Amino acid sequence: MRVLMLSKACVVGIYQPKLEAIARRGIDLKVLAPPSWKDERGEQILERAHTAGYQLQSIPIRFNGSFHLHHYPTLGREMSAFQPQIVHIDEEPYNLATWQALYQARRIGAKALFFTWQNIKRTYPPPFSWGESWVYRKADYALAGTDDAADVLRAKGYTGPVSTIPQFGADEALFQPAPSRPDRPFTIGYIGRIVPAKGVDLLLRALAALDSDWRLRLVGGGPALGEMRTLAGALGIADRVTVVGQLPSTEVPAQYREIDVLVLPSLTGDNWKEQFGRVLVEAMASGVAVIGSDSGAIPGVIGAAGLIVPEGDVPALTRAIRDVKERAAVRADLAERGRERFLSTFTNDSIARETVAVYRGLMERGPSSARAG
């Protein structure tokens, strides 16, 4: 079975083991990714970290960094040359790249599926609303990152088949529990984008109320980083905060070996709530206790393997961190439950298995009745 995947997310090296796992299941897989992707953290250059068994090809991109308008001028030519049976569009249905890929898939008679994280019902102005509705009518299948995202698809009018499968998991060989480090102070970690929606300011305020010795490790970049440095100074905790900054994805697994608990204090806004929180999965895989707010998908990802606090509640966050810090048995139990949850639900291998099952089901359904236009 020949599958062509279009994915700007796959510029990130530690996302690529899923692609190897798909290929191991007998799929002739070709992945098209841009040479880089730009966002508020800067420019992520395509990493070729895990490329065994499939083709990872760079493809020119226009409007790099524009979530809604980016597209690929040579995509039609690449599809015609590869002649896939299935086109996996790893993009939201309201993006120009999705419309382009779906049209080109229909042109060569391939089946097509798309992916969505959208867990808030939002209405877009034309032409995005028109394109989104067209994708709903013409796509053969939809993948939703969470059940909430699948519910939004239905509420917005999609009537085709859908499966809930996370976009990426984590690789058990890359993310593993590390020996304890009694020689260092208790270390709290935040890994991800430094933007207001992620609630890093709340974490700093919660830690300012935490007595005894501790350290905070901030890994990531974003427009709010300078503001967080200033806030740490104003709270009198700057000497306890280490800012690692943005790293190549292949260096991220080692960061989990430097922390005792990962905290993700995301905040729900008018147009966004936490869509998944992949760092929670990586932390659980690494045997690190996790604490998250109750924003969006976080409680569903953590399950019973971590602590959940009300979003925006700084005293509750302080109490949760103190509980994990001062009670070694609690910390060890959360670490063990997290690792078990990861192995049962969030490995790249399990996500690949579910994804390939969708591919095979599509092929068994016979030719697509949808056509471009």
Image (spheres, helix red, strand yellow):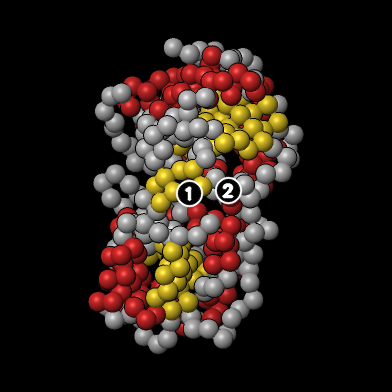
Label at residue 47: 2
**For this rendering, which residue is in front, 33 or 124?**
33
Q: Which amino acid does label 1 sit on?
A: Gln
| In the depicted structure, whether residue 265 falls above or below residue 92 | below
Residue at (64%, 41%) from the top-left corner?
19
Q: Which residue is disc 1 drawn over?
A: 44
User: Gap in Å between the C-alphas at discs 1 and 2?
Assistant: 8 Å
Find residue 337 and report its image quarter.
Answer: bottom right
- SS at mark 1 in the image: strand
Residue 346 in sight in this render: no
- SS at mark 2 in the image: loop
| In the depicted structure, whether residue 114 falls above or below residue 17 | above
Residue at (37%, 81%) from the top-left corner?
239
Tags 1 and 2 touching, CB below 8 Å:
yes
| In the depicted structure, whether residue 367 falls above or below residue 208 | above
Residue 180 placement (x, y as % from top left): 61, 78
Residue at (40%, 28%) from the top-left corner?
96
Q: Quadrant of the C terminus?
A: top left
Residue 52 placement (x, y as % from top left): 71, 44
**For this rendering, which residue is in front, 203 or 191?**
191
Q: Residues within 10 Å of mark 2 (few under 14, many from 20)?
A: some
Residue at (41%, 70%) from the top-left corner?
243
| In the depicted structure, whether residue 254 falls above or below residue 92 | below
Relative placement, left or right, of 200 versus 20 is left
Residue 191 placement (x, y as % from top left): 46, 62
Label at residue 360: none
Find residue 298 and report its image quarter.
Answer: bottom left
Q: What residue type is labelled 2?
A: Glu
Q: Quadrant of the N terminus?
A: top right
Q: Residues within 10 Å of mark 1 (few under 14, many from 20)?
A: some
